Image (cartoon, helix red, strand yellow):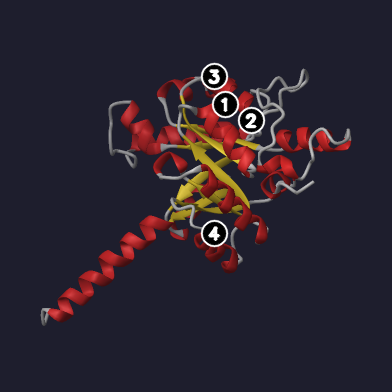
Amino acid sequence: MRRNKLRELLAAGKPTLGTHLLSTWPAMVEFVGHAGRFDYVEFVAEDASFDLAGLENLCRTAELFDLASMIKVDQQPRTFLAQRAIGAGFGSVLFADCRNAADARECVRAARPDTPEDGGSYGATFRRQAYKFSVGASEQGPREYVQAIRDVVVVLMIEKKEAVEQLEEILSLPGVDMIQWGPSDYSLNVGRPGQTGSSEIKAVERRVFETALKLGVPPRCEIDSPDEAKYYLDIGVRHFCIGTDVTVWFNWCQQNGEAMRKALDGG
């Protein structure tokens, strides 16, 4: 059975580092792999254009470099998107817009096998993820298939007022492996759009992280630069996703384009 690297790192209590991609172009995954510094890539499907074949090719490339793979899926149709992504080979699903404990249960159920003991909704399929198990050929294959679905890492966005209010209930649900704070969505949801750095929003952020750590659910933080990490490290956060391919490219174009324009204009 192919290893789920992110699951193994979490089980061992080790820190993890990922980076965001909004492109399924396999070369982007190769660049991350060749860098040799990251544990996984996160494909931000919530904000990107993609097709199912592209998801499979992203996962194939990640596997070549021993990179884990995570996908961030929209709030709807979350079950369809999560299960097709798992079928493509993603070992982790980040569910956006988890509004309350009922949503959290639905998210977990989408990424767990449809067995009496697991209570999930992921059934027997012959998607790419299942090829290696030869489902139905022997008892061993299906058992490994079920275990692989159990090993999928479930991450929930905490970015709505109701989710914060029900945070302890959400964190206590079996199958919730990690949470991610979403300051932009939260500030919008509470009527403070764009005020992600305000003292009020930062206080909620800190409470979310500290509560997760207290209840034994690792929180993950998204940052744009290593300079931002110390604040979160001091809280106890050990899981980070840094940078986004399109943002890196935009910043390069803006900064270098401006410098060259000044040179061309004689300034």
State how many labels appear. Answer: 4
> Within 10 angstroms of label 4, few (less than 14), some, or many (20 or more) residues?
many
Disc 1 and disc 2: Cα gap in Å? 7 Å
Q: Nearer the viewer, residue 74 or 185?
A: 74
Residue at the image position 21 percent from the left and 70 percent from the top:
258
Q: Quadrant of residue 36?
A: bottom right
Determine contact: label 4, label 3, CB under 8 Å. no
- At mark 4, the secondary structure is helix
Measured as percent of width and height from the top left, residue 163 is found at 47, 23
Residue type at numbered disc 4: Val
Residue on which the image places disc 3 = 101
Residue 218 seen in the figure: no
Q: Quadrant of residue 108?
A: top right
Disc 2 and disc 3: Cα gap in Å? 16 Å
Point out the tag, 4 or 2, that comes first from the N-terminus: 4
> Within 10 angstroms of label 2, few (less than 14), some, or many (20 or more) residues?
many
Question: Any mark on residue 29, and which?
Answer: 4
Residue on which the image places disc 2 = 111
Residue at the image position 63 percent from the left and 30 percent from the top:
111
Point out the tag, 4 or 3, that comes first from the N-terminus: 4
